[in-house]
Amino acid sequence: MIKKIGILTSGGDCGGLNAVIRSVTLTAINKYGWKVYGIKDGTEGLIRDPIDAIELNLKSFESNLMRLGGTFLGSNNSGNPFNYMQKNGKRIDVSDKIINGFNKLNLDSLIGIGGDGSMKILQKLTKKGNINFVGIPKTIDNDVMFNEFSIGYDTAVNVATNALDMLQPTAASHKRAMILEVMGRDAGHIALNAGIAGGADIILIPEIKYSLKSIAKHIEKIKLKERSHILIVIAEAVRKEDGSKAYVKYLNGQVRLGGIGNYISDRVSNMTKVETRVTVLGHLQRGAQPSHKDRLIASAFGVYAVDMIAQKKFNRIVVWQNRKITDIDIDKVAGKSKTIDIKDPLIKVAKALDIYVGEI
Ligand code: F6P
């Protein structure tokens, strides 16, 4: 008999997380009469002593939580429990601690909300601890395999599209080439979708090679025939000409993708004499108010995940396929990443609109 379930958010936050926690809690309590425990800061809450988890109830959601970005449970995207960095800088395996924490809470099942990286960790962890696990995909990168829409992706694409809407008038006023660098890790979903929706002239994604010469030629052509300003969208993992990616190193030693916009900007302005400016959109894509679609997907995924627990369908991930929700074995998803196929219909759309999307 299921009586008590746990829920945690893992990896980078995004719009729609509070909505999915709400959906799980409301369904578990209203439909099944179960207790729900929200674990703090991803799996971190299970390592702490005392365990950092709170019982969630209907009152927990009486405020405007579902309308807000972020996750009120907290999350963590810098720790692998099998290789966990301690305060003294040494790395140890804390997986047993997490499993013990889970067992101490006396939970019958765990819902983990995460992206491809988190799913891989949670798969390993729940297998080791024999934990009844259901995964829900969330990530602005939208790179979870066999899943069309991850929670948070739509909000991020909207933010990037809005950014292009706001860059266009200032680009036109100053006859500039405006470069917008967006997130997405190794997948170009945000860049391609927002680029088309936001009327970009050039979209660079990690999946397709570009040539600086072709970019310059495309800019010259637009300036000659169409208009004096240009919009360029670049995904953060697009490579430099030597094949390396652009990174930012933070003072605490963390290394994150970033900087390719400036790299391309310097080269493009040199080659074309067009004035360029760069906007790095960054975490606005994550913290924005969740879109209607993300709240909807979050609500539907939450209900489905709780129903799966009731049916004892474990070690599976909820996915969106062909306009409906279904579930898939976690082993098929974990460790894989859904990037853009060059045969993606949107590439054809972009090319027909005379958007430069690389050398294809
Ligand atoms: O995976 C989500 C994501 O926002 C990526 O698009 C980005 O590369 C990364 O996380 C940024 O991580 P952090 O929040 O640690 O800077």
Image: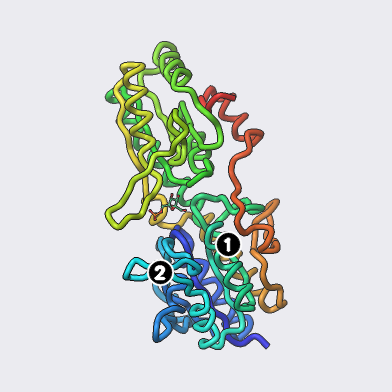
Report how far apart the C-alphas of labels 1 and 2 lie in the structure: 19 Å
Determine whether 161 is above or below 288 in the image: above
Residue visible at 65% across and 56% down? 320
Density class for disc 1 (Cα within 10 Å; few <14, some 14-19, many ≥20) is: some
Q: Which label number is shown at residue 120?
A: 1
Q: How many marks?
A: 2
**Quarter holding the N terminus?**
bottom right
Return the residue nearer the eye: 155 or 63: 155
Q: Where is residue 349 in the image (x, y as percent from the top left)?
A: 60, 30
Q: Which comes sooner in the sequence, label 1 or label 2?
A: 2
Q: Which label number is shown at residue 31?
A: none
Type of the residue with mark 1? Lys
Determine whether 80 is above or below 216 in the image: below
Density class for disc 2 (Cα within 10 Å; few <14, some 14-19, many ≥20) is: many
Type of the residue with mark 2? Gly
Q: Give residue 359's quadrant in the image.
A: top right
Q: Name the residue under label 2.
A: 74
Q: In what element is the residue under mark 2?
A: loop
**Quarter holding the C terminus?**
top right
Residue visible at 55% across and 32% down? 208
Residue visible at 51% across and 25% down? 356
Q: Give residue 144's quadrant in the image.
A: bottom right
Residue visible at 37% across and 47% down? 282
Q: Is residue 241 left or right of residue 249?
A: right
Q: Which residue lies furthest to the front in this view?
A: 90
Q: In this view, does 325 lie to the left or right of 353?
A: right
Q: Position of residue 188 (x, y in %)?
A: 52, 41
Q: Which of marks 1 and 2 is in front?
A: 1
Q: In what element is the residue under mark 1?
A: helix
Q: In this view, does 30 lie to the left or right of 312?
A: left
Q: Which residue lies furthest to the top in this view?
A: 224
